[in-house]
Image (cartoon, rainbow, N blue to C red):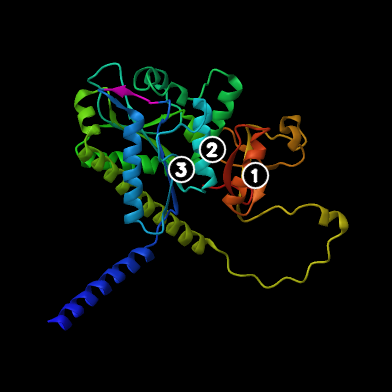
Amino acid sequence: MRARYFTILLAAVAAFLTEAATAQNTPCGIRVVVIDPGHGGDDPGAHYFGTDEKTLTLTVALKLGQLIEEGMPGVKVVYTRTTDKALASTKIEDLQARADIANRAGGDLFVSIHVNAAKEAAARGVETLVMGESTKEQRYNEDALYENNRDDLIDMSDERTAAIVRAYIQNLQFTYGEYSLAMARFIQSNYVKTGRRSRGVKPQLLRVLYATDMPGVLTEIGFLSNPKEAVYLKSEAGQDEIARSLFVSVKNYSDYVLETRRRAEEEAAQAAPKPAPKPEPAPAPSDDAAAKPEKKTGAHFAIQILSSKKTVASDSPEFKNYRGKVREYTADGEFRYKYCVCECDTKAEAQQRIEEVRKTFPGAFIVRCKGDKIAK
């Protein structure tokens, strides 16, 4: 009897180890997920029926993080906060601090969790926001975000700020835009599968998404101002269901990134030219040639500081203290010419240098390049 018991026990342990090893070896398209519970500390967010937004977002965030750690071994979870606290004394500094945490962690995906509110108690449903600008933006600001998220928005009344932000949005299609949209659509689709009313994916000028150097979304998990949805949001069953929807979306997104990467590798392999005969050794460079840094021709990263419809001379005063240090890239669209500094082999290296660049160009952001073009 004892021998049979140990045989069963060993079989169970072996099965567990096999399953764990399989999970550990399952490829993931992402390595670091940053989860951002909205508000905190002296900033409660929306407050209805005796409940604060900051409490609900933190609860759902921690549940989501646990699901990722258990269900996606090898993926690191980073939180912007794990307790009821603000990250800075002002709202704008708090939002920047959240983005800084994500950027320092080298995040591959940023998920900010919020709870909605509206003037009319009948407003209900879920929506997910991506960085962008819509024609209905003003009405949307006044309605859905009227009470608790005003400081979350970028002030576009200043022409210089507006120009920088719009140039950034235009470049999203070459960097993180399509990935952020994919994640937002996965979230909305999984919400609907649990019976939630979808209010869709919407572009919005959100500070925290503007400041993060990775694909990112801000999801509104329901209206705390709606009595029926408030009951759902405050219940453990509702919080578990929301966290599960977000977790499945992260898995969907990871698979999407893997598939996108696989297709790109296949296309690159098919387009790769046959190796040419080895050329004769080049003559030794002169002292003048050796002094000039060689341009990177393969895939690399750089920090974009300016976008223009026309070419701009490298010694233009527009480049300020980076005069003579910029490199011109091109991309599709009205603002065809992109000017970058700090060419880097890795994104992590570019992230280490971007803060210095932003002291001169606050709207600077990281782009992926291939040769002289901004690459998707």
Give the mark toward the camera: 3 or 2.
3
Who's the residue at 62% across and 41% down the image? 354
Query: How packed is label 3: few (under 14 Cα within 10 Å), some, or many (20 or more)?
Result: many
Q: Which element type, helix, strand or loop, lies under badge 2?
A: helix
Q: Which residues are magenta?
A: 44-48
Residue, far left: 1
Who's the residue at 51% across and 60% down the image? 268
Q: Main secondary structure of the magenta part?
A: loop
Is 80 included in the stretch rendered in magenta? no
Label 3 belongs to which residue?
215
Q: Is residue 9 left or right of residue 82?
A: left
Q: Of the residues shown, which amino acid type is indicated by label 3?
A: Pro
Rendered location of residue 365, percent (x, y): 58, 39
Q: Mark 3 or mark 2, which has the lower sequence index?
A: 2
Can residue 252 be seen in this snapshot? no
- The answer to whether the residue labelled 3 contacts the one labelled 2, judged by CB atoms less than 8 Å apart, is no
Q: Mark 1 or mark 2, which has the lower sequence index?
A: 2
Quick one: 335 or 363, which is closer to the camera?
Answer: 363
Rendered location of residue 289, percent (x, y): 83, 55
Residue, far right: 287
Rendered location of residue 136, percent (x, y): 39, 21
Q: Mark 1 or mark 3, which has the lower sequence index?
A: 3
Can residue 67 be seen in this snapshot? yes
Rendered location of residue 91, percent (x, y): 49, 26
Q: How many angstroms separate mark 1 from mark 2 (CA)?
A: 20 Å
Quick one: 205 or 295, which is closer to the camera?
Answer: 205
Label 1 belongs to which residue?
353
Q: Which mark is residue 27?
A: none
Label 2 belongs to which residue?
171
Query: How packed is label 1: few (under 14 Cα within 10 Å), some, or many (20 or more)?
Result: some
Q: Is residue 89 above or below residue 272?
A: above
